[in-house]
Image (cartoon, rainbow, N blue to C red):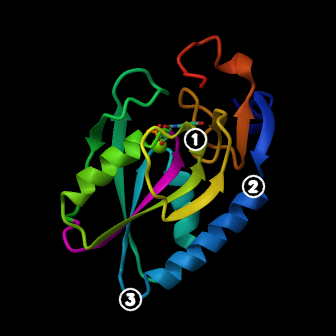
Amino acid sequence: MNVNMMSADIKKVLITEHQIQEKVAELGAIISKDYQGKNPILISILKGGVVFLADLMRKITIPIEIEFLGISSYGKSTKSSGVVKIVKDLNIDIRGRHVLIIEDIVDTGLSLTYIKNMLIARNPQSLKICALLDKYEARVQEIFIDYPGFQISNEFVVGYGLDYAEKYRNLSYIGVLKPEYYKQKGDYNLK
Ligand code: IMP
Ligand code: MG
């Protein structure tokens, strides 16, 4: 499946590559200013947050470190249960450090709340959240996003790290999948 073949599965482009890159540059500039002299650790949540981290970190002009946290939700693949299993833990101790979580999307807010509480228990000096997409209408658990990108409506989106059944992560834009590509499978809860 090449990129053009993937585009055929997309109903509409929600956020263009250009819009994403502008937002990423904007966020990078703000983060660089806020974390001056703090050597923060950017923690990307695998796998969706990886594309965003890769672009964002290159728009940050201060020293940073990066880490990866691998999680998988219990239960059905695309429906958040709020209980996440750590499949790859951090390689370092975050005690006393400034931590910035880099996430692709906040949907119900359940996964991120779980992760946030788990990391706070490790006593970082600070912990903040940067999320490219905010599906605010779907929120079940209120969670403050310190560095938000775009607010989007309650549609299932793919691209720029986000997948459906592990596909479409390599699209450079955020798109809405044609319903026939996921409805039939019946494993996404269309709210
Ligand atoms: P939450 O616990 O419902 O906030 O789940 C967030 C996670 O669900 C994200 O990190 C994504 O991996 C996944 N997710 C939520 N909405 C979408 C979407 O529209 N497309 C792809 N993945 C999504
Ligand atoms: Mg994710």
Tag 3: residue type?
Gly
Range shown magenta: 94-107
Residue on which the image places disc 1: 162
Q: Residue at x 81, y 36 (%)?
A: 12
Q: Is residue 184 above or below residue 171?
A: above
- Other residues around mark 3 within 10 Å, as few (<14) / some (14–19) / many (≥20): few
Identify the mark nearer the N-term, 3 or 2: 2
Identify the mark nearer the N-term, 2 or 1: 2
Q: Is residue 101 above or below residue 61?
A: above
Tag 1: residue type?
Leu
Q: Is residue 140 left or right of residue 26?
A: left
Find the residue positioned furthest to the bottom: 37
Residue on which the image places disc 3: 37
Q: Is residue 173 above or below residue 177?
A: below
Residue on which the image places disc 2: 17
| Label 3 close to label 1 by CB (< 8 Å) | no
Tag 2: residue type?
Glu
The answer to which of 2 and 49 lies nearer the viewer is: 49
**What distance separates the C-alpha of mark 3 from that of mark 2?**
31 Å
Q: Is mark 2 within 8 Å of ligand 1?
A: no
Whether residue 90 is visible? no
Mark 3 lies on a secondary structure that is loop
